[in-house]
Amino acid sequence: MSRAPRKDAAANRERVLDAATELIRRNGEKVPMADIASQAGVGIGTVYRHFATREELLSAIVHRSFELALANARAAAGQPGSALEGVRSFLVATLRDRDRFVLPLHGGPVVFDDAIRALQAEVRVVLQSLVDRGHAAHELRSDLTPIDLIVSASLLSRPLPSVEDWDLYAGRQIELLLNGLRL
């Protein structure tokens, strides 16, 4: 029987993941583990106690990112009202959470294990339910797929380097996209 980690250990793990997410997004996946520890305010031993290898850390970050994507997809699909509003909700949530994502489509490491693949598949299933609802109500184009939503969300969440108010531009792109999806 395994017991839950102590609260301070769980908090340290989350700080390490937050620091690694920020540094990897800024500097790439080869950022030194010591830099991650420093950013998290923990010792290097704490990092290695939670993540024995860089690969384990990268996997945990990607896993956490897919969990966030799944939560956003579920919230969008569970939203009452039109499927188009659900699609808007998913795109806006992805834009809102863009700094928390470290996923392959978001420029992150290409890491896939069975747990990550299961989350990835669940995101697609949930988004398919939203798309199916839109198709059944004749609200969404018949050729729209979950992959279209995932790619669009990924592109919107990657600000262009020279654009100062990305949220404004991305919001406009969301509205243009929604107009193109509407029947």
Image: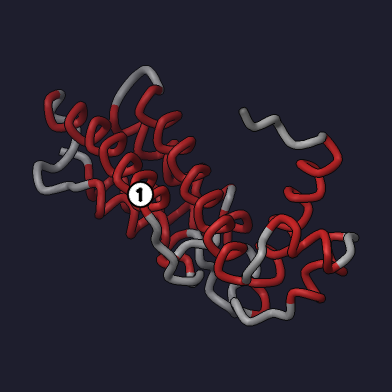
Disc 1 residue crowd, few under 14, some 14–19, many 20+, Cα 10 Å: some
Residue sitting at 74 percent across and 64 percent down? 48
Residue sitting at 55 percent across and 49 percent down? 64
Q: Nearer the viewer, residue 141 or 71?
A: 71
Q: Quadrant of residue 41?
A: bottom right
Query: What colour scheme does the image use?
Result: secondary structure
Q: Secondary structure at mark 1?
A: helix
Q: Is residue 43 above or below residue 9?
A: below
Residue ranking furthest to the top? 80
17 with respect to 182 (left or right): right
108 with respect to 57 (left or right): left
Residue 168 shows up from this direction: no
Report the label total.
1
157 with respect to 105 (left or right): right
Q: Position of residue 183 (x, y in %)?
A: 15, 38
Q: Position of residue 124 (x, y in %)?
A: 28, 44
Q: Which residue is mark 1?
A: 120
Q: Position of residue 129 (x, y in %)?
A: 24, 31
Q: Disc 1 residue type? A: Gln
Q: Nearer the viewer, residue 52 or 101?
A: 52
